[in-house]
Image (tube, coloured by chain):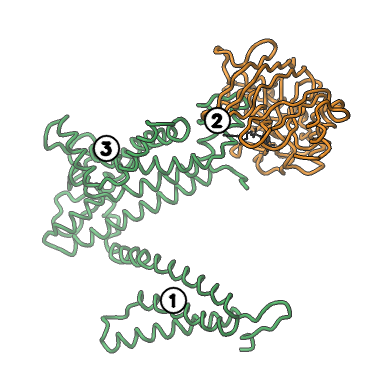
Amino acid sequence: MSKRIEVKDLNVYYGKFKAVEDVSLTIEPRTVTAFIGPSGCGKSTFLRTLNRMHEVIPGARVEGEVMIDGKNLYDADVDPVLVRRQVGMVFQRPNPFPTMSIADNVLAGVKLNNNKMSKSDAEHLVEKSLKGANLWKEVKDRLNLPGSGLSGGQQQRLCIARAIAVSPEVILMDEPCSALDPISTLAIEDLIDELKAKYTIVIVTHNMQQASRVSDKTAFFNIAGTGEPGKLIEFDDTTTIFENPHVQATEDYISGRFG
Amino acid sequence: MTALVVPAPTSARHLSKAVMWITAGVSALVAFGIFAVLSAAGISEGFNIVAAVFVSAILFVLLSYVLSRIVEGRRKASDRLATGLVTTAFIVALLPLVSLVSTAFVNGLPRLDPLFFSSSMRNVVGQGGGGLHAIIGTLEITLAATVISVPIGIMTAIYLVEYGTGRLARAITFFVDVMTGIPSIVAGLFAFALFAIVLGPGIRFGIGGAVALSILMIPVVVRSTEEMLKLVPNELREASYALGVPKWLTIVKIVIPTAIGGIITGVMLSISRIIGETAPLLIIVGMSTSMNYNLFSDRMATLPVFVYTQYASQGSDAQAYIDRAWTGALVLIFIVMALNLIARLVSKLLAPKGLR
Ligand SMILES: Nc1ncnc2c1ncn2[C@@H]1O[C@H](COP(=O)(O)OP(=O)(O)OP(=O)(O)O)[C@@H](O)[C@H]1O
Ligand SMILES: [Mg+2]
């Protein structure tokens, strides 16, 4: 049920400022793709175009095509709300809804869309999603307490549970571990490995080891200078990128010579 | 007094708590002494307790600064001076409030009896009578004004924060700002003129007062709600969008519930702002000595106007009128306090739990 994403000649703008230029790449179903690159090169910006979250920002717009299973996301007849139900997202900072309990947070995607659900179905979905996010054991006794009472790492896994509860086909993660300790990071990396069996995953990370541990493919983005648009420099199997990259800039970045 | 100087290897010398208390006691003694002498000598009329408290606070600040400068050195002394000044400012701000409440309480107490809450002023020229008609009138008109203002105010704020960009939003913000400054008498005249055009001259009824009060209330609701909605982190909105929740549902189910505590507090503040308005009600609602529970016809009594008329047109037994005026004022204060307490409770119950 996961899908292939094909991006063709994508330009992304914030008003007049072109943040990302001319990106083309294909993401295969049931793989993990990592985006790496120096700060400000447009990784988050590009990631957010894959579920039309980019246009939430006033003045932001996109040129080009993003095809998911042959259908262009940016066609006029596509409803961004429906796109986002298929392409879930986990943000850099954990953001559980403060007004809701842990269980309600997991159910948020379903409940907020006014879908009625029987109590047993709801309980089942909560358990399944929390187990899927490796959080069930830690919170099963306090499902009715507020989600903001959890630790940062637990909150992030709660957000992952919330994202998978609406059964998306693709999950986008923007530096999901940047605010977490090594143990939580490891838990999330293991989780990504498990989720890969069902979902297509795209992850932005600043951590080279993480990229090489979790991803099948890696995309390296770079930026020529401030005010210039970010570009896709190299996109290949993770082993190739990390062992013998074809572009000098990639090698410099990976070996820590800049960025 | 062994505690005056406490030498410790790692910390500098410092004044102990006991010394500060003694300093405070000495300042109070001196200040109260001065004012007691002044009043005994007949220079000031009676013992001026407000001035005495104020002077003792100032004395205490100066005294502790000097002491601290000698014992603790310059940095600590400045710290004490700043703390003292801030505290004095707080006391100065509090004094009128305490004085006001206590005066209203002392003067209002004589008529704070069951009769006041069970009768109107119908056929009363001397003692007796009460403010029931005015209490009911105030509650009804305020409720009607709230019912009109809160939906309009909250929806305007939602438009401004969540949807509004460009000219229209700027125009609305500008007009809301202008409305904030409208004198209440103008709001009353506006409502009067409006209803005079529609329903003929000389019209007086409760709902007209509610409309006039709404004009004063809406900008307050818009402003406070706007601030509260702006405090809701954008991340929550994005998290909701990313789950495929449409914008309007995100607003209804995420943004508003997150901000609801603050919104309610704002609404309550706006009610407190209008519940004591006198001028507009005098114009469009008028006054009545008897019960009228119908907002849509005839003059109605309201507490502020009740207080005003009791004071302004005293009958045969002047003291009875003045007593009723004070009790009316006291009841108004009670109503505002009760509303504030309820608002606090409600916003506490509804506020997001476990926020860091
Ligand atoms: N809301 C915005 N409005 C205008 N410009 C923006 C906005 N968000 C990002 N940008 C700009 O777009 C460019 C790309 O930013 P982006 O956040 O995508 O970088 P990034 O690669 O994710 O960086 P990091 O690794 O630091 O997260 C930057 O130049 C940034 O200043
Ligand atoms: Mg980023």
Of all chains in the rendering, the one displayed in green is: B
Tell me the element at label 3. helix
Q: Are labels 2 and 1 on one chain?
A: no
The structure residue drawn at horizontal position 49% and vertical position 82%, both measured from the top left corner, is B63
Q: Element type at marker 1? A: helix
- The x and y percentages for residue A160 are 71, 31
Palette colour of chain A: orange
Locate residue B14 relative to residue B119 in the image: left or right: right
Residue at 15% x, 53% y is B124
Q: Which residue is labeled 3 in the image?
A: B211
Does the Cβ of the disc 2 residue fall within 8 Å of ligand 1?
A: yes
- Does the image show residue A160? no
Q: Amino acid at mark 2?
A: Ile
Rounded to the nearest angstrom, the CA distance separating label 3 from label 2 is 38 Å
Quadrant (top left, top right, bottom left, bottom right) of the N terminus of chain A = top right
Could you tell me the amino acid type at mark 1?
Ala
Left/right placement of residue B319 relative to residue B267 reads left
Find residue A82 and report its image quarter: top right
> Is B198 displayed left or right of B175 in the figure?
left
Image mark for residue B57: 1
Q: Residues within 10 Å of mark 1 (few under 14, many from 20)?
A: many
Location of residue A161 by image quarter:
top right
- Residue B269: horizontal and vertical position, in percent? 39, 48
Based on the displayed image, in which of its 4 quarters is residue A64 positioned?
top right
Q: CA distance from mark 2 to mark 1?
A: 54 Å
Looking at the image, the residue that sits furthest to the top is: A70
Please tell me how many numbered marks the rendered image carries.
Answer: 3
Say above or below: B313 vs A105: below
Mark 1 sits near ligand 1, with its Cβ under 8 Å away: no
Q: Mark 2 highlights which residue?
A: A57
